[in-house]
Image: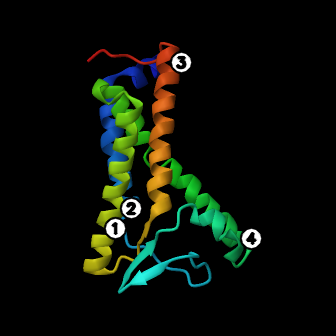
Amino acid sequence: MRGLRDCWRSRRFWHWEILLYTLVIVVVCFSPQVSNPALPTPGVFYQGRLAFLLVPFNSLWNLGQATSLLHAVKIVFQNVLNIFLLYPLVLGLLMVKPSLRSVQVVLLLGFALSLSIELTQLLLDYLWNFNRVFELDDLLTNTFGAYLAYRTYLFLEKRKMVSDEP
């Protein structure tokens, strides 16, 4: 157990985690999405082939439009996954970059990363029709995930489980 604790406390571990998880984000967020007409996303509107979902907490307000229990579960599950999309990346960044360790910086970082993802998805849709949706809820849930990573860092720091060693 001690070897594992020492491993994840090392900066090298967190640098690899940041690199590998960034690749995961690229694949997950920037791959073309296959649409399923049986499970439409409620509240989406289109401007040409660009899709937008700009209703805050759309999943709550439009959950009643789900076509089945499976559809409702998919909508809720997607939001839960969005909360944790940036969590590993932000936690890794907090482990190696002390200048990021404030709630204001983390919230700004989470929002900026999320907005970058959403705008890149719009660009990919505009150029190649990747079938992605610009969702306001993604900005909110991803930013919340960054905040949870910050709270996790504080929890680990309080218990002396993080290291500031190079």
* Number of residues whose C-alpha sits closer than 10 Å to that of mark 3, classed few (under 14), some (14–19) or many (20 or more): few
Residue lying at 34% horizontally and 50% vertically, measured from the top left: 113
Rounded to the nearest angstrom, the CA distance separating label 4 from label 2 is 25 Å
Rounded to the nearest angstrom, the CA distance separating label 1 from label 2 is 7 Å
The amino acid beneath tag 3 is Met
Among numbered discs 4 and 2, the one appearing first in the sequence? 2
The amino acid beneath tag 4 is Leu
The amino acid beneath tag 1 is Gln
In this view, the mark in front (4 or 3): 4
SS for tag 3?
A: loop
In this view, the mark in front (2 or 3): 2
SS for tag 2?
A: helix
Rounded to the nearest angstrom, the CA distance separating label 1 from label 4 is 28 Å
Q: Position of residue 87 (x, y in %)?
A: 46, 42
SS for tag 4?
A: helix
Residue at label 1? 121
Q: Quadrant of residue 166?
A: top left
Residue lying at 30% horizontally and 33% vertically, measured from the top left: 15
Among numbered discs 1 and 4, the one appearing first in the sequence? 4
Among numbered discs 2 and 3, the one appearing first in the sequence? 3
Q: Quadrant of residue 163?
A: top left
Q: Position of residue 73 (x, y in %)?
A: 68, 64
Rounded to the nearest angstrom, the CA distance separating label 4 from label 3 is 42 Å
The answer to the question of whether label 1 and label 2 lie on touching residues, with beta carbons closer than 8 A, is: yes
Mark number displayed over residue 69: 4
Is 4 above or below relative to 90?
A: above
Among numbered discs 4 and 3, the one appearing first in the sequence? 3
Residue at label 3? 1
The residue lying toward the viewer, choosing from 148 and 89, is: 148
Mark number displayed over residue 29: 2
The amino acid beneath tag 2 is Cys
